[in-house]
Image (spheres, rainbow, N blue to C red):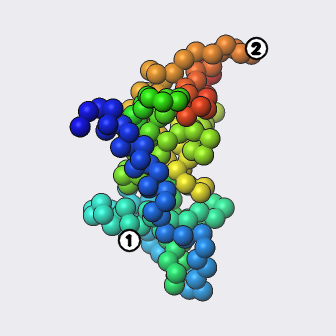
Amino acid sequence: MSKAEELLALLEKAEQDEQGLPPVHKWNPERRDDIDMRIASDGTWYYQGSPIERHRMVKLFSTILLREGDDYFLVTPVEKLRIQVDDVPFVATEVETVSGDGPDKLVFTTNVDAHVVAGARHPLRVETDPDSGEPRPYVHVRDNLEALIARTVFYRLVEQARREEQGDGARLVIDSDGQTFELGRL
């Protein structure tokens, strides 16, 4: 398979990922409880203090994850279990640029093997720590769930970005699927 075919397959996978998810937002089970499960800021899932080693289990849990306000839940038709999330539930561990018909697209792969095309439906945002000035970049995955963009992936975005002058200074921006996203001020 050529590189172009691989990248087109990534785009198709991103579309399928969103369509194949359970309709957790439609489920409203009566049984509600808290569970000793936590997602660390590095994307590691823990149950009762121990990391969940089975990647397939983490992937399955990720498909029934729901966020309401600042709370995160695992939802099934019969129960809704609150879990703890240190920052955001996912980490974007890879990015590929797909060029072809139309605008270039940034396709992110998360730690749970989900694929997301940055654009209007899946915007990028970068927060800056007020004390250290460190950037903390995110990509919207689905509903109101986000992935932290891993540092190495963010560096790749910065390498691909362009400088854009504004009245109050310059900024670093990158385009994906017809949208322009600011990565930081210069």
Find residue 172 and report its horizontal and vertical position in percent: 58, 21
Q: Quadrant of the N terminus?
A: top left
Q: Work out whether residue 178 or residue 132 is closer to the camera in this orientation and state it.
A: 178
Q: Is residue 102 above or below residue 124?
A: above
Q: Is residue 146 left or right of residue 167?
A: left
Instruction: Determine which residue is flagged by label 2.
Output: 167
Quarter-of-image position of residue 39 = bottom left
Asked if disc 1 and disc 2 are in contact, CB closer than 8 Å, the reply is no
**Could you tell me the amino acid type at mark 1?**
Gln
Q: CA distance from mark 1 to mark 2?
A: 52 Å
**Could you tell me the amino acid type at mark 2?**
Gly
Q: Is residue 163 above or below residue 87?
A: above
Q: Is residue 141 above or below residue 100?
A: below
- The residue most toward the front is 101
Find residue 37 and report its horizontal and vertical position in percent: 44, 68
Q: Quadrant of the C terminus?
A: top right
- The residue most toward the right is 167
Instruction: Determine which residue is flagged by label 1.
Output: 48
Q: Earlier in the sequence, mark 1 or mark 2?
A: 1
Q: Is residue 31 left or right of residue 14?
A: right
Count of numbered circles on the image: 2
Question: Pointer 1: residues within 10 angstroms few (<14), some, or many (20+)?
Answer: few
Find residue 15 and report its horizontal and vertical position in percent: 47, 51
Image point (32%, 37%), residue name: 5
Q: Is residue 74 above or below residue 111?
A: below
Q: Is residue 162 visible?
A: yes
- Which element is circle 2 on? loop
Image point (60%, 55%), residue name: 144
